[in-house]
Image (tube, grey):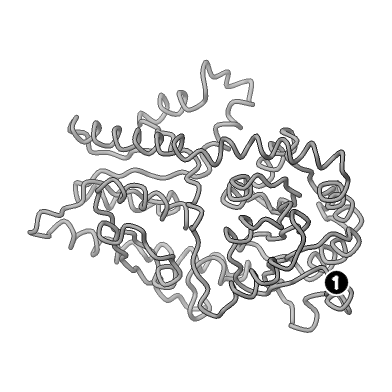
Amino acid sequence: MLPYLELAERLASRGHCMSFVSRPRNLVRLPPRRHAVDLVAAALPLPRVEGLPDGTNSTNDVPYDKSDLYWKAFDGLAAPFVELLGTACADNEGTMPDWVIADCFHHRAATIALDHKVPCAMLLQIAAMIAAFAQSCSEWEPEAFPVAVAVAVLGKPLVHLGLLPLSPDGGRRSCDGGEDATVRWLDAQPTSLVVYVALGSEVPLSVQQAHELALGLELAGARFLWALRKPSGATNEDILPPCFRECTHDHGLVIMGWVPQMTVLAHAVVGAFLTHCGRNSLIEGLMFGHPVVMLPIFGDQWPNACAMEGMKVGLQVARDEDDGSFDREGLGSVVRAVMLEEEARKVFVTNALKMQEIVADRNHHERYIDEFIRQLRSYTTDGNSSTYN
């Protein structure tokens, strides 16, 4: 969600009036808006579906075996979006939307927008991974970067938006003092000696995986801060191995719940990031020049991890060839190599800092946004009314 908000912020900063549409609980969690006058929030509650847990707001709230019910409810957002857009288009104050910019998962948004004679741009965060895959398929033999092929096939222009990295103050604020407690713990640690562990919010680890990760951290002997999402099927008693907290209390902290990730990654004591290599997390880690320990779980996390390992920004945790599992010994050895083995760490830090020069270059990313706006204006001026990718 935060990259979409970042795009809205960037557009609002240029004087464009933006409505950011999401579920109510998402909107409550948003950080203070830097351009409050030109950026307003609009809530679309997720429709109730029998069998879906009460209070469901996103995929984070849904067990894997009920994901089909979530997507059924998600499709139900079409009707309230029709009403919201219809109201905006009927406004007599001259504020009819110029564009709808939709997440690609909101597949009905383009049709709804076009029904209201509003052009639509679909934001595809995974497009770079697909393009890289297309380029690797020799039988397709694209003559240029695969984006050119996509333009020819789809008949729609594609515009690079860059990485949409969050501003250094991005991310929401904690309301329960959790951020203060986390920062106090970090403040007491030595510089660059803490590995931050966070594996995203979409797919929780199993109890067995959480135990192997915990014991791997213990074997590594490095200081760590672990943002742990409660494993599926776990009780409070069996989330971590017996005596794990006692054995690591002098050099480790486990937090169940929200952690101010950008604040943590920006802290001087963090020396590496153990991540699932989700797009957003990887970008955030590289913004601060951190080498990475990679534990991909699904989707584009695998090619992301392979790319980072190829660039020698870090190491992947070894997996069993048959079932894809990892063990404590493999995880511990990789954490030691990235954090504690001087020669290996020097290589990873050097390359991570090279990546930081690209990812943290604000001017570079701002040029992408300027070109995006230019394309939208050009497309509208030409009298087109279609879907834009």
| Picture layout, residue 212 above or below residue 51 | above
At x 66%, y 39%, the residue is 353
At x 58%, y 72%, the residue is 179
What percent of the width, then of the height, locates residue 75? Answer: 41, 62
Residue of label 1: 248
| Picture layout, residue 385 above or below residue 74 | above
Q: Which of 143 and 280 is in front in this view?
A: 280
Q: Give the side of residue 229 with respect to residue 315, left or right.
A: left
Which quarter of the picture shows residue 249?
bottom right
What percent of the width, then of the height, locates residue 72? Answer: 46, 65
Q: How many labels does the image show?
A: 1
Dot 1 crowding, Cα within 10 Å, few <14, some 14–19, many 20+: some
Does dot 1 land on a helix, a strand or a loop?
A: helix
Q: Which of 154 and 229 is in front in this view?
A: 229
What percent of the width, then of the height, locates residue 45? Answer: 37, 72
| Picture layout, residue 15 above or below residue 210 | above
Q: Quadrant of the C terminus?
A: top left
At x 47%, y 28%, the residue is 147
Which quarter of the picture shows residue 190?
bottom right
| Picture layout, residue 239 above or below residue 351 | below
Amino acid bearing label 1: Thr
Q: Which of 386 and 213 is in front in this view?
A: 213
At x 74%, y 53%, the residue is 192
What percent of the width, then of the height, locates residue 382? Answer: 19, 29
Query: Which residue is situated farthest in the top direction here?
Result: 143
